[in-house]
Amino acid sequence: MSATRVFVARLAGCSVFDPAGDRVGKVRDVLVVYRNTDAPRVVGLIVEVPGRRLVFLNIGRVTSIGSGQIITTGLINLRRFEQRGGEVRVIAEILGRKVKLRDRSGEATIEDVAMEEVGPGEWDVSQLFVRRPKATASVFGKGATVFVDWNEVTETSTVGEAQSAQQLIASYSDLLPADLANAMLDLPEQRMLEVAEELSDDRLADVLEEMPENDQVDIMNKLDDARAADVLDQMQPDDAADLIAQLSDERGEALLDLMEPEEAEDVRFLLSYAPDTAGGLMTTEPIIVSADATVAEGLALIRRHELAPALGAAVCVTLPPYEPPTGRFLGMVHFQRMLRYPPNERLGTLLDQSLEPVMANTSAAEVSRILASYNLVSVPVVDENRRLVGVVTIDDVLDYLLPDDWRSTDHDSDTRSQFSDTSTAAIPIKARRTGNGTR
């Protein structure tokens, strides 16, 4: 082993490699089991492998921990991880717990856990890094933070009780929305709802967009109307429309009334289209410019960090007004073409004459065929007066074509001792927005 003592919080996100140097995943947590009087024993790591699936890696399969990476023997069980009775996740369940210090200096909060190698392939929890409340530290003349051995504290929480939601969110602060959504879905339902309550509106909006619809609905039904409306305001209009359509008519209308007027207007507009049409798939927030706009202005708009890559692949040129539904749609200019012209070139001279927009009532199947046939990442959508009403992006189409549970990569509950190769299955087409009677 390259290290005999490791702090668990520093392992989160570390890459896991096989002996050949190929990356197999990244660490998401450490799994321990409690013992009667001794410190907890480390049984393994929870590793996220491609496909956002969490699997179990026995600690005995780890040959090296150090320099921000972990080396394994190459044997990893590909079955989806399922937590067993008696097993406790360090990051998700121990960090943030309250403990009492046996030196009678008061209560403290666990901020990190050190695990130490005690034998070949055997690791135990050795020390805790804890923080005292400022008032307590001042009274006892001790530092606010201190390292203590496991036997120097007494837990005030029930074994297996999760730490504060705030602490868990802090542990996962570096995760992308899709990864955080996946991590939340692996938590018990009540725990997932607690974490959702503590997330900021924009962060929760990003996470909800990455969750299956039934989980989105479960979370929204637990939020009060004011908070739910604030979250919907932060979501992409097409995602917000899909979610509202899964709620009851009364709740959906109540939330629309509480949303910001402009955001609610976009969502109502999208809900007016059938779910299996271009209008039902599109987003109403493409980049729209005038024909007199320059290449420099177009490139500045697509550089915005919050812009989705598919939306930044091209700009739409229309007559005024420049908010959907716009004036007459003139055409699109792809960013690669903009790169080939000087900054002062006007975008109206660079229109892609070969790309025809689709009507809002065009079928989703036809939109998919167009994107595939012409190697496009987006296609403009117009109404009967050729006014631009939105664009359908490749991710909108994929979300439509994939099955409802596509985010759940593995539903197999066999034991970890069995190994399995991933398999593919036929992908049925789904219909969206069937939750209420507005369609």
Image (cartoon, rainbow, N blue to C red):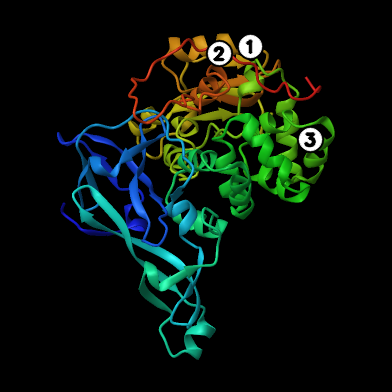
The amino acid marked with disc number 1 is: Thr
Disc 1 marks which residue?
362
Q: Amino acid at mark 2?
A: Val
Residue drawn at the location 21% of the way across and 33% of the way down = 74
- The percent position of residue 84, horizontal first and vertical second, equals 46, 40
- The answer to whether residue 322 is seen in the rendering is no
The one nearer the camera, 294 or 128, is 128
* Distance in Å between CA atoms under marks 2 and 1: 7 Å
Question: Is label 2 in contact with label 1 (beta carbons under 8 Å)?
Answer: yes
Disc 2 or 1, which lies upstream in sequence? 1
Q: Which mark is residue 367?
A: 2
Question: N-terminal of the two: label 2 or label 3?
Answer: 3
- The image quadrant of residue 81 is top left
Whether label 2 touches label 3, CB < 8 Å: no
Please tell me how crowded label 1 is: few (under 14), some (14-19), or many (20+) other residues with Cα within 10 Å. Answer: some
Residue at mark 2 to residue at mark 3: CA–CA distance:
28 Å
Q: Nearer the viewer, mark 2 or mark 3?
A: 3
Judge left or right: residue 35 versus residue 317: left
In depth, the one of 376 and 40 nearer the eye is 40
* Figure quadrant of residue 283: top right
Residue at coordinates 81% horizontally, 37% vertically from top-left?
A: 251
- SS class of the residue under badge 1? loop
Give the vertical position of 73 relative to 128 (above or below). Answer: above
Measured as percent of width and height from the top left, residue 27 is found at: 34, 45
Residue 183, image x and y in percent? 48, 42
Give the residue drawn at x 53%, y 20%.
397
**In this image, 325 relative to 344: left or right?**
right
Q: Which residue is located at x 51 percent, y 63 percent?
A: 97
Measured Cα–Cα span from mark 1 to mark 3: 26 Å
Q: Are marks 1 and 3 in contact (CB under 8 Å)?
A: no
Give the residue at mark 3: 252
Q: Secondary structure at mark 3?
A: helix
